[in-house]
Amino acid sequence: MVWGDSDCYKHFLPRIFELVVTDGERRKSLDRELVFKILRYGEWRAWPTAEQHAIELFLRAVWEAVLKNPQREERCRDIESWICAISQPEDNLAPYLEQWENDESHPACSALAGFLLNSAITRSKRQGRFEFWAERDSQYAQLQDWVKSPAVREKLKRASEKWPESDEFEAAILIAQ
């Protein structure tokens, strides 16, 4: 349940974002998907340009930090949770997918492989999807198309050559076809 109006939400938004980013790893506090979904309900794209820009910068910075995170436990669930959360206020995931595609670091490549190997993203049915994707079918379809793109396969091939000791990349290439 949510109380207050958009101005009230804006007032608390810096602290809410702080909690999502710092407590999100423990997953005991706020659902990042729900927090970001409220941005859409608050019609953040109608906010003043400077406020919209601040939200965009925050989302891009969070996504960059998520991609650079080397933690392996629950990595694919975390990646899917974050991209799902970002899809709540964003109608177009292309900038985030491009950022992922261009990040050649081991954590970003490993996250992609883990995501492909453990997520429902490559299935055509809705079975196994995060519940927060329910209202974001076009973003989910955009993500599905991207993971099966030649660019993703090439990224995984480069990762496989760069880190041949990891067999996750070869397995992910097969799924991305």
Image: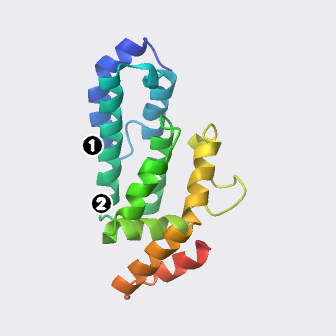
What's the CA distance linking mark 2 and mark 1? 13 Å
Q: Can residue 79 be seen in this view?
A: yes
Residue appearing at x 46%, y 61% in the figure? 76
Disc 2 is placed on an element classified as loop
Residue 98 spot, x, y in % from top left: 43, 56
Residue drawn at x 35%, y 50% is: 63
| C-beta proximity under 8 Å, tags 2 and 1 | no
Image-quadrant location for residue 120 = bottom right
Residue sitting at 64 percent across and 40 percent down?
134
- Please provide percent x and percent y for residue 36: 44, 34
Res. 24 image quadrant: top left
**Residue 69: numbered disc:** 2
Q: Is mark 1 on a helix, strand or loop?
A: helix
Q: In this view, does 46 lie above or below 103?
A: above
Residue 99 in the figure: left or right of residue 122: left
The residue closer to the viewer here, 171 or 177, is 177
Quadrant assignment for the C terminus: bottom right
Eyeballing the image, is 48 above or below 116? above
Amino acid type of the residue that numbered disc 1 sits on in the rendered structure? Thr
Residue 2 percent across, percent down from the top left: 47, 19
For label 1, count other residues whose C-alpha is less than 10 Å away and answer few (under 14), some (14-19) or many (20+): few
Q: Which colour scheme is used?
A: rainbow
N-terminal label among 2 and 1: 1
Residue 108, image x, y percentages: 36, 65
Q: Alpha-carbon neighbours of circle 2 within 10 Å: few (<14), some, or many (≥20)?
A: some
Name the residue nearer the viewer: 83 or 51: 51
Task: Give the residue at x 60% y 58%.
Answer: 144
Asked whether, in this view, residue 140 is left or right of residue 36, the answer is right
Label 1 belongs to which residue? 22
* Vertical relation: 90 (above or below) 150: above
